[in-house]
Amino acid sequence: MYLEFENKDNKLIVHMFGELDHHSAEEVRNKIDDRLDRDNIGKLIMDFSDVSFMDSSGIGVVIGRYKKLNSKGGTICITKISGSVKRVFELSGMFKIIKFYKNIEDAVESI
């Protein structure tokens, strides 16, 4: 999995490319946490537009970032989810605790 980071209005936007599964989860978790801590950012937007596959390890990455930010008074949201990846989020009940936006612009304005 490949990650691109963008800082917009003191919000970290993570553009993810590839598969978020047990092979890539730890690396993704470490890279996002490193950037959140280094830049002292409390708002995270995860862009799933180019994620082709996600398993329960991916859910763990998202939930872990939610817990990390929530404990510091921060927030997380996800954008541009579709297909089978969206189905994983629906089945896991993630949309009950993490907001979903259709595009990054809406997410930046809302969180």
Image (cartoon, rainbow, N blue to C red):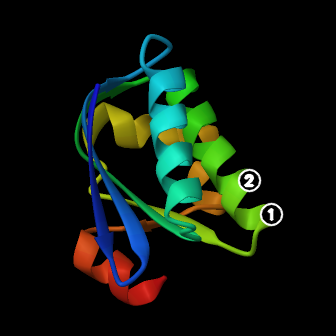
Assess whether mark 2 and mark 1 are in contact (beta carbons under 8 angstroms): yes
Q: Residue 71: image x %, image y %?
A: 80, 63
Tell me, for residue 101, which label it has, or none: none
- Dividing the picture into quarters, in which one does residue 6 lie? bottom left
Residue linked to disc 1: 71
C-alpha separation, residue under disc 1 versus residue under disc 2? 6 Å
Residue at figure coordinates x 37%, y 76% from the top left:
107
In the rendered image, residue 15, in percent from the top left (x then y), is placed at 26, 49
Determine which residue is flagged by label 2.
67
Image-based side of 75 in relation to 18, left or right: right
Vertical comparison of 83 with 8: above or below: above
Residue situated furthest bottom in the rendering: 109
Q: Secondary structure at mark 2?
A: helix
User: Under tag 1, what secondary structure?
Assistant: helix
* Apparent side of residue 105 relative to residue 63 in the rendered image (left or right): left
> Viewer-proximal residue, 42 or 18?
42
How packed is label 1: few (under 14 Cα within 10 Å), some, or many (20 or more)? few
Q: Specify the amino acid type for callout 2.
A: Lys
Give the x, y percent position of residue 86.
38, 43
